[in-house]
Structure formats: C-alpha cells, structure tokens
Amino acid sequence: MGFSFVDVVGSPDPFTCPGFFSSGVSAMTKPVFIDRTFLAELSQEAAQSPRLRKNRNFHAGNDDACHRLLNALEPGTYIQPHCHLAADKEETLIVLCGRIGVLLFDAAGQVIAARELIAGGETVGINVVPGVFHSLVALEAGSVFFESKAGPYQALSVAEKASWAPTEGESGVADFLEAMLAHFAR
C-alpha cells in the first residue's frame, strides 16, 4: 500500500513542480519530512500491532521498481530468518532510531555474523546480498530503520524461508527469538 502526504499532514493540497514529471509519471503528492515525531508515531503504531512491527511505504505500490520504506520494530517481534534468491533483491537497511540486531546465518542455520545497528553509532546499517539468510531483532523500543530494495514485491518462496527456523506463530518461536537475542546480551 502506498503512502501519501495526506496521511502525514492531512492536507490534500498537491505539490506541483511544472514540467518535473514530463513523462506523466507521478510521485508522492508532497515531500514528506521524516522527523522525530513522525518516527515516534510509527513506533507507537508498531507497539500497538499484534506483530510488534509496522512499515510505512514511500513507494506507490507493490509493482514499483524501487521499494523505499520505514520499518518500526518493537522488542518481541519475530522475523523468521530468510534470504532472497533473485539476483536483484539486495536489501539496504539503515537504522534511524534505536538499536536493532542483525544476524546472518549459513545455510544450516549457524550464526556467521551478529552485529548491532545503532542510530548514530559505529554501525548504522547493512547491505544484505542475495542468498544470505538473515533476520533482525529489536533491541530497544522505538527502533526504526529505512529499507530500500528492488521491486516488484514477491512473497518469499519456500526455498527462501529458513527451514531450520520456526515460522511466525509456530511453537518454538519464543525459544528461537531468545536464542537470537542472546547474541546481543550486554
């Protein structure tokens, strides 16, 4: 689902720049400033979501060539380790608020790297290449990252979901999440 300026400020007044989109292709109707209030509101939506996460898309639809979005994660959310097999499905993630743990796994499910991504810290993001199993864990409330990846949207195939990790809603999720979080214990 797309995101419009109306959703941010409640104004339907279109932003116009004559001749800018000479091809007739339109973008968002207005620029969107991503400020602390905007990020806090997105985090609040995530905290109220049963899955403890919420995304805000800046691309118009699932068929767009480039997907750009904010993703808010709250502690306790579970993202099943997965990979993207298509050669054009790199993902770039940059943390804007909070702390997020990223884990990279080999094909057998062994953690090969675990790193904290901290807004304003030493490591703020990662570029995940196709074929690498990965997952994220929220290490503090109010964690939000910017994500960019190639479209169009494609649901994960069976081969892209880690068979050695439980799927969301299955028994074993709490234990698996706890094991992932243990890589970031202080």
Image (spheres, grey):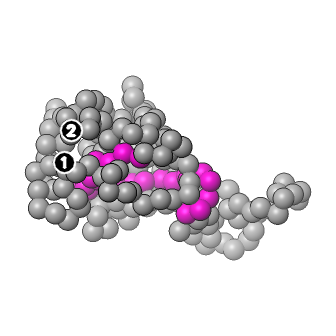
Q: Which mark is residue 102?
A: none
Q: Magenta region: which residues?
A: 62-84
Q: Assign the magenta stretch its main secondary structure.
A: loop
Coordinates of residue 103 in the picture (x, y in percent): 28, 37
Q: Earlier in the sequence, mark 2 or mark 1?
A: 2
38, 29: nearer the viewer: 29
Within 10 Å of disc 2 (Cα), the crowding (few <14, some 14-19, many 20+) is few
Q: Residue at x 19, y 35 (%)?
A: 110
Q: Which mark is residue 164?
A: 1
Within 10 Å of disc 1 (Cα), the crowding (few <14, some 14-19, many 20+) is few
Coordinates of residue 55 in the picture (x, y in percent): 44, 59
User: Quarter of the image holding residue 169?
Assistant: bottom left
Q: Tell me: residue 95, above or below residue 61.
A: above
Coordinates of residue 56 in the picture (x, y in percent): 49, 60
Q: Is residue 37 visible?
A: no
Number of callouts in the render? 2
Q: Residue at x 62, y 53 (%)?
A: 65
Q: Is residue 74 magenta?
A: yes
Q: Quadrant of the C terminus?
A: top left
Tell me if 100 is positioned left or right of 149 in this view.
left
- For the residue labelled by badge 2, is the local secondary structure a helix, a strand or a loop? loop
167, 68: nearer the viewer: 167
Name the kind of residue labelled 1 in the image: Trp
Tell me if 32 is positioned left or right of 75 in this view.
right
Q: Is residue 66 magenta?
A: yes
Q: Tell me: residue 36, above or below residue 153.
A: above
Tell me if 177 is positioned left or right of 162 in this view.
left
Label pair 2/1, CB-CB below 8 angstroms: yes
For label 2, the residue is 108
Q: Residue at x 27, y 29 (%)?
A: 113
